[in-house]
Every structure is written in structure tokens, then in C-alpha cells.
Image: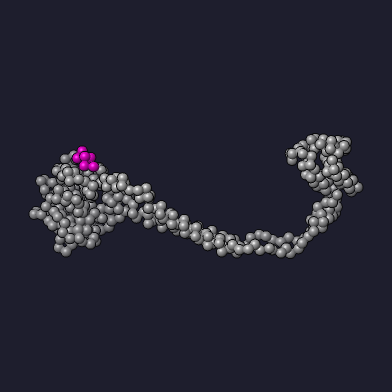
Amino acid sequence: MSLAAAPGTGSTSTSPTAASLWRGGRGVLLVALVVVVGAVVGVLLGGLGEGRPLDPADASLSGGKGLAQLLRANGVQVTRVTSVAEAEAADSGDSMLLLSDTSSLSEGEAERLGSMSADRLVIGVQPHQELLTPGVSSAEKARTRSREPRCALPAATRAGSAHMGGVTFTTPAQATGCYPAGGTPTLVSYIDRDRTITVVGDGQFMTNLRLAEDGNAALAMNLAGARPTLIWLVSTGTAEQAAGDKSFYDLIPGGVGWAVAQLAVVVVLLALWRGRRLGPVVAERLPVVVRAAETVEGRARLYRARRARDRAAIALRAGFVDRVTPRLGLPSAAGPEATVEAIAERTGQAGLHVGAALYGPPPADEAGLVALAEFLDMLERQVKQS
């Protein structure tokens, strides 16, 4: 029986080079870079439109959490309310009511706010303005920028320049106007029925974005922190009412659109990267064609040169068992006893001789190895013919 052998030919290095690694991985790196850049842009652009303006619990750029924390640090109790009833319940008699958005309030609710005894700070032009700031009406729009107070109001003079504008107001009698734009004030403060009412054209100076500029923080604290308790009304009715009229697609966050666009770009780039490599299969010519018989003879010569009769016997026995076991109907995990018994029963050979040929000691010389090969060949032919 012949033995498999491999000739002592030289080996060819197949280790990847730096150039091959770069060619294989540059597409993946490009796609990963596009995903990362798209995600960062999506987060930055998506974060610009979020947040509720002038909400004491909102930490976004347009929120008012920074001012709320400054007021609390200076002993002012900041109470966030979302309804007129909560605002009335929080009025302690020595309070300041801050109104930044009353668009969802009815005329009756605005009248209830107007009748409260608390001082009032109104941001911008609001619906039912005559009920909230009696005697004050809007005049013209004004660009919001850094302006000087140019008035005698202590809260403004102590703060100095501030980011003011938005809209100007006509001032009632005995009112103080500050931060003028074209001669008309953008901040008006006056007393009405023992209440101090202050109205400003734009509340950007109170937001987290502008609070650290000019004297914005000082002006915001002087106006909103004039009383021990600040009742900060945040309107939520508009969003709640509008949600009932929106479709399912309107309720999907804006960031989802950016995510879908990023995935589309990635798919297109991946298709271009992989698509240009598609083509007909190329048959590669082998440098040397070695016949199976040559490899068997070469390996046999190596075993003979090293007198490795034990290894040769192991190879012969293992090959015989692998070829014969399926013909005998035995599982691949069958043990030596089951294998010897099945071969002896099929061939009629003595089980002792079969066991010694398959699992006995290695041959002592080359003649014994040749005899083992011939015996195994004979057993295999008998199994095939039975």
C-alpha cells in the first residue's frame, strides 16, 4: 500500500504587507469615517432645535436653568408652574410672577393672572397684553444687541449693558423706560395698583446662551429676583393640544431623518466601493503542478530516511479505518473493539489478527511494515467484496 509524502520544496510567504492591508481596509475606514461625521453633524444640528425657551428646568441653549440656579443660590425660591391655578396657589403675597409664553392661555386665564397681587415680569409681546401689562403697548421691532440702559432704574443701572431688543414699547405715565432703540425703550417698568410691572422686548439675555455676556446675568437676577419667591410660569398647553392633531409621522423626532440620510449615504458608498470590484472570475495559473503519486513517494522517502516506521504505521492504520468504517456501517466514534469485531465478522479473519494489525505495536523493521500494509490491503479488499 502506498504512503502519502510531500516533497521538500521551498515555501512561498503569504504574510500580508502594509500596502495590501491598506487596500483592503481603506473602504471600511472611509465608511466608518462617514458614519462618525454624520452622527456628529446630526447630533449638533438636532440639538439646536430642542429645548423649551426660558424653562427653568431646561439646560439647552434657549432654556433658563442657569438663571434659576443663580437665583436659588442667592436665596430666591424659584417655583416652576405650568397652569394658572398652580401660579395662584404659589403666590405668597411677596412674589414675582414671570411670564414668557402665554399663547395657550384663554382670556379668562390671562385676566386671572392680571388680578394677582404679585409683581410681574413679562417677556416679549404676549396675547391679552392689555390684561397683563395695562397701559403698555408694543411699538416697533428692534434688533437684539448689546445696549446701554440710559435710564435711572436701579436694576438696569447696576447691571450696565445687556443684550436687549426684540420690540419697543410705549410707556405709560410715571413709567421708566430703559435700553432704548431709536429713542423708544425696550424695557419698561412701572407701578400699577401697588405692583411693580416690568416688560422687556426680548428674553434672550435670560437664556443659558446669553447669561454670561455683558451684564445679562445681573439684569436678569435684578429683575427676576426682586422678591423672595419667583413664580415661573411655563406654558405646556400648546404642545399638548398640538400633539392630538399630529399624525404618526409628525411625532417622529427630527433626528430620525438625519439617521436615515446617513444610512442612505453609507449604503451608496458601500455599493460604489464593492461594486467596482465585481467582474468575471479570473483563473490563476499555478506555478508548479505536482502529481499525487509524487507527493506520496516523497513522503514515503522521508519516513524511510528517518526510520519513522511508527508514524508510517499510524498513517496506514488511520487511513484504513477511515475508509472501511463507513462500509461497515459504524459511526465515526466507534471504539477499537467494535471496529475489530465488525471487520473480523465481515472478512472471516481472526479477531486477534485484526486487532494486532490495527492497534498492535509498530513494526520492528521494514519487512514488518510492508507486511502490515499488505495485510491491511487484503482486509480492505475483502470488506469491499463482502
Q: Quadrant of residue 384?
A: top right
Q: Quadrant of residue 90?
A: top left
- Count of numbered marks: 0
Which residue is painted at 80% across and 56% down in the image? 292
Residue 6 percent coordinates (x, y): 79, 56
Is 270 magenta? The answer is no
Question: Is the stretch drawn in magenta largely helix, strand or loop?
Answer: helix
- 304 and 315: which one is in front? 315
Which residue is painted at 17% across and 49% down in the image? 128
Residue 375 percent coordinates (x, y): 88, 44
In-image side of 209 versus 355 (left or right): left
Is 88 magenta? The answer is yes
Which residue is painted at 30% across and 53% down in the image? 62
Residue 234 percent coordinates (x, y): 25, 46
The answer to whether residue 158 is seen in the rendering is no
Which residue is painted at 56% across and 60% down in the image? 274
In-image side of 227 versus 290 (left or right): left
Q: Quadrant of the C terminus?
A: top right
- 53 and 152: which one is in front? 53
Query: What residue span does the magenta drawing correspond to?
Result: 83-90
The answer to whether residue 138 is seen in the rendering is yes
Which residue sits furthest left?
173
In-image side of 23 versus 218 (left or right): right
In the depicted structure, whether residue 312 falls above or below residue 36:
above
Q: Quadrant of residue 179?
A: bottom left
